[in-house]
Image (tube, rainbow, N blue to C red):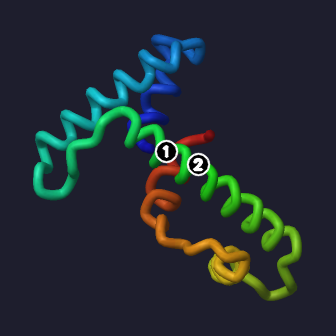
Amino acid sequence: MSAYYIISEDERRGKNQKKTSIWARVKEICDANQAENPGKLGNKNIAQMKGRYKRLNESAGKWVGVYRETYRKRRSGMNMKDVENEAHMLYETSGSKFNDTIVFSEVMCRHRK
C-alpha cells in the first residue's frame, strides 16, 4: 500500500499515470523491498497486490468513516486516544476486525489520500 501511494503521488510523473504503469512500478518497489527482506516479505504478483490494496482501501474507508463519526460525537473530557479507542470498538462491533493497525497507522498517517 505504501508503494502504491509513493508512486501515485510522484510529482515528476503527475497524477495522470496509466494504471498498468503504476502497478508495474509498484511491483518494482515491492520486488526491491522483498530482495532486501526475503524472510519478512513474500513474493507477490500484480494481481495479488491489487487485491490486497483494494481490501485495505475499503477497510480504510470504513475506518475513516467510523473515526469521523466518533470524533464528531466526542464527549467532554475525551482526549484523542479515547476517541481512537472508541472508534476501534465501534469498528469491530460493525463486524469488521481491526487487524490492519500497522497499515493504517504507518501508511495512512504519512499520505494525504
Report the residue marked by disc 1: 53
Quadrant the N terminus occupies? top left
Pointer 1 and pointer 2: residues touching (CB < 8 Å)? yes
- Relative placement, left or right, of 24 versus 65 is left
Q: Residue at x 86, y 84 (%)?
A: 75
Vertical placement of residue 34 versus 39, above or below: above
Q: Is residue 55 above or below residue 100?
A: above
Provide residue 100's location: percent of width, then percent of height: 48, 65
Give the amino acid at mark 2.
Answer: Asn
Q: Quadrant of residue 45?
A: top left
- Residue at 21% across, 41% down: 33
Residue 30 figure quarter: top left
**Residue 23 point in image, percent of width and height:** 41, 26
Q: Can you give x and y, in whole percent of width and height, for residue 3 in the image?
A: 39, 37
Residue 29, quarter of picture: top left
Q: Residue at x 48, y 11 (%)?
A: 13
User: Among all residues in the image, which is located at the extreme bottom?
Assistant: 77
Residue 57 circle label: 2
Q: Amino acid at mark 1?
A: Tyr
Classify 10 Å Cα crowding around label 1: few (below 14), some (14-19), many (20 and above): some
Quadrant where the C terminus is found in the figure: top right
Label 1 sits on a secondary structure element that is: helix
Dot 2, how many residues are within 10 Å of its Cα: few (below 14), some (14-19), or many (20+)? some
Separation of residues labelled 1 and 2 (CA atoms): 6 Å
Q: On the picture, is 40 further left or further right than 76? A: left
Residue at 49% from the left image edge and 44% from the top image edge: 53
Q: Left or right of 36: which side holds 1? A: right
